[in-house]
């Protein structure tokens, strides 16, 4: 899988892909992540990528020309399944989106900035608009990193135990059950006996019941 991220602030994306699971995924060549500096496609000698909005108003707008030049350059190298724009007014990112994106071969992720991008790009070029929540950040770089993390960990071979991702919260519209590790008794706080019983079927049933109860209590909207 190839993920090409277009941004006006590449340094913001250096750390997320330089550590832990994402770093190993890149090193194992299970995913290729390219961070593209939009200013390389900027207009004139000033490498301009934003301008004032028609009609006036506060804030700058990301220009159509640099973005289209960048996307056309990328399209000349490979075919893309999705061109995703990170924006506060997009669809809220869900596990179902991540499951779908993880099955694709190539995607472009465009990080919004300033007051957003020229609307014509949203009308004619962008294929999916994604938000990570009902709040506004300084740019789309952090949301892009969040989404990419959620996608990459689902790619076969990325996690040491591939079944781990299948038992995460939201995969079956349930929250994950509580988990415990050693010691079994810490200052009188004990691990449930069922988890120490060795009966795999009973443990699995207990975990499912705990997931149901936790979901009903914390996220009844998922049921």
Image: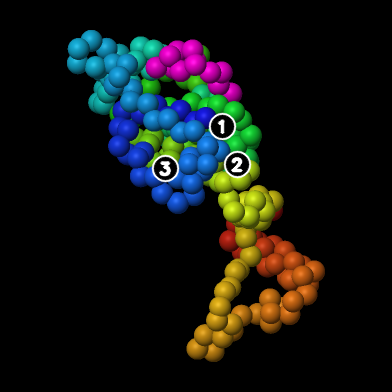
Instruction: Judge left or right: residue 37 versus residue 73.
Output: left
Residue 221 visible to the viewer: no
| Quarter assignment of residue 11 | top left
> Residue 174 — which label?
none
> In 3D space, how far apart are the residues under numbered discs 2 and 1 (Cα atoms)?
9 Å
> In the image, what residue occupies the spot 46% across and 18% down?
74
Tell me: residue 218, above or below residue 186: above
Which one is in front, 140 or 145?
145
Q: Which residue is mark 3?
A: 17
Name the foreground residue: 116 vs 10. Answer: 10
* Residue 73 covered by magenta stretch: yes
Give the residues in magenta.
70-81
x, y (%) of residue 117? 38, 22
Residue found at the far right of this picture = 201
Magenta span has 131? no
158 left or right of 53 in image: right
| Residue 205 to residue 223: above or below | below
2 and 1 marks in contact (CB < 8 Å): yes
Q: Earlier in the sequence, mark 1 or mark 3?
A: 1
Rendered image quadrant of residue 42: top left
Colour convention of the picture:
rainbow
Q: Secondary structure at mark 2?
A: loop
Query: Could you tell me residue 165's position as x and y percent?
Result: 62, 51
Q: Is residue 3 left or right of residue 179?
A: left
Residue 185 percent coordinates (x, y):
56, 86
> Which residue lies at the image location 57% right of the left edge and 46% below the top edge?
158
Q: Which mark is residue 1?
A: 1
Q: Label 2, on which residue? A: 155
Q: Is residue 46 visible?
A: yes
């Amino acid at each position: 899988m190839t993920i090409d991220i277009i941004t006006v602030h590449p340094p913001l994306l250096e750390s997320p892909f330089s550590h832990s699971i994402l770093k190993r995924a890149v090193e194992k060549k299970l995913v290729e992540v390219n961070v593209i500096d939009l200013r390389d496609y900027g207009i004139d000698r000033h490498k301009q990528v934003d301008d004032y909005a028609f009609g006036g108003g506060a804030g700058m707008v990301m220009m159509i020309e640099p973005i289209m030049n960048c996307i056309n350059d990328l399209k000349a190298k490979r075919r893309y399944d999705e061109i995703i724009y990170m924006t506060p007014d997009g669809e809220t990112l869900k596990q179902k989106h991540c499951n779908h994106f993880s099955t694709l071969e190539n995607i472009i992720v465009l990080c919004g900035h300033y007051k957003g991008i020229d609307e014509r790009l949203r009308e004619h070029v962008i294929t999916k608009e994604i938000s990570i929540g009902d709040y506004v950040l300084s740019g789309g770089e952090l949301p892009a990193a969040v989404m990419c993390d959620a996608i990459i960990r689902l790619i076969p071979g990325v996690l040491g135990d591939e079944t781990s991702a299948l038992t995460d919260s939201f995969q079956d519209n349930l929250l994950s059950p509580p988990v415990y590790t050693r010691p079994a008794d810490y200052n009188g706080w004990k691990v449930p006996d069922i988890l120490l019983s060795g009966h795999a079927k009973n443990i699995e049933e207990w975990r499912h019941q705990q997931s149901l109860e936790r979901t009903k209590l914390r996220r009844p909207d998922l049921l």
